[in-house]
Amino acid sequence: MPRYSLVSILLLAGCSTTGTGLSTVQTTPATTEVETAAGRYSITSTGEQLVFSQTLHAPSNHVWTALPMVFETLEISAGVVTENQSYGNPSLRVNGRLAGERASLYLDCGKTPIGAPAADSYSTDANVLATLQPSGQESTHLQIRLHGVATPRAGGGRAPCTTTGKLENRIAEELTALFQPRP
């Protein structure tokens, strides 16, 4: 279990969250470049994408401080940290497990030829990105996007993966736990 400074935890105390949920947004084709040990390739997502949105009743700098702790707790390495408060990993390699659970709990990549969830047995490259936007002095708007592409380990076609919404909810629950007022 990671250790956090008492100052970080106390800084987060007293904050709360509201309004969790997934919403569908129309997107234009977007390409994410992925570099793995096997080489470099592109993940293209098109059509509709599910986006998790939540309002956190905490200043964005407090939420920004908490995101690395939450991602570390969920065993998700951060591959990108931007100045506009986006945090995540656009080239997360998922080998059947994500956040300590079966990948199919969080990603729907269809079924294998024998009917098993493809996310659990295919090689999957996922993109998970949390973006913060200040919403007043004491509130922050959080958006999380999760999607990917699964490829059979023996080669062959690729299957697009969409979120089930459960990873985004876990991230929100972890943040909420940090922001709950202390008795």
Image (cartoon, helix red, strand yellow):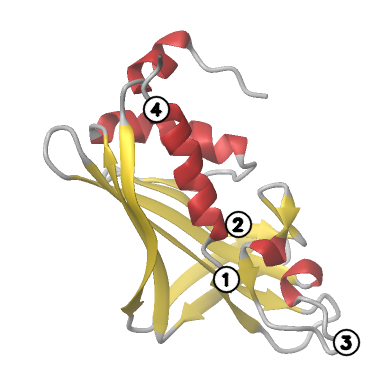
Q: Position of residue 21 (x, y in %)?
A: 39, 61
Compared to residue 74, the image places residue 94 above or below, namely below
Between marks 2 and 4 in the image, the one whose residue lies nearer the viewer:
4
Q: CA distance from mark 2 to mark 4?
A: 30 Å
Question: Of label 3 and label 1, which has the lower sequence position?
Answer: 3
Residue at (11%, 40%) from the top-left corner?
136
Q: Which secondary structure, mark 1?
A: strand
Q: Amino acid at mark 1?
A: Gly
Question: Which residue in the structure is indicated by mark 4?
Answer: 180
Circles 3, 2 touching at the beta carbon (< 8 Å)? no
Q: Is residue 77 left or right of residue 25?
A: right
Task: Judge whether residue 104 can be spotted in this image.
Answer: yes
- How many other residues sit within 10 Å of disc 1, few (<14), some (14-19) or many (≥20)? many
Q: Residue furthest left?
A: 136
Question: Which residue in the structure is indicated by mark 2?
Answer: 92
Q: Position of residue 105 (x, y in %)?
A: 67, 63
Question: Which residue in the structure is indicated by mark 1?
Answer: 148
Q: CA distance from mark 3 to mark 1?
A: 21 Å
Residue at (50%, 38%) from the top-left corner?
174
Question: Of label 1 and label 2, which has the lower sequence position?
Answer: 2
Q: Amino acid at mark 2?
A: Leu
- Count of all numbered marks drawn on residues in the image: 4
Q: Amino acid at mark 4?
A: Gln
Q: Amino acid at mark 3?
A: Ile
Q: Position of residue 143 (x, y in %)?
A: 34, 56
Task: Judge whether residue 89 can be spotted in this image.
Answer: no
Circles 2, 4 touching at the beta carbon (< 8 Å)? no
Question: Which residue in the structure is indicated by mark 3?
Answer: 114
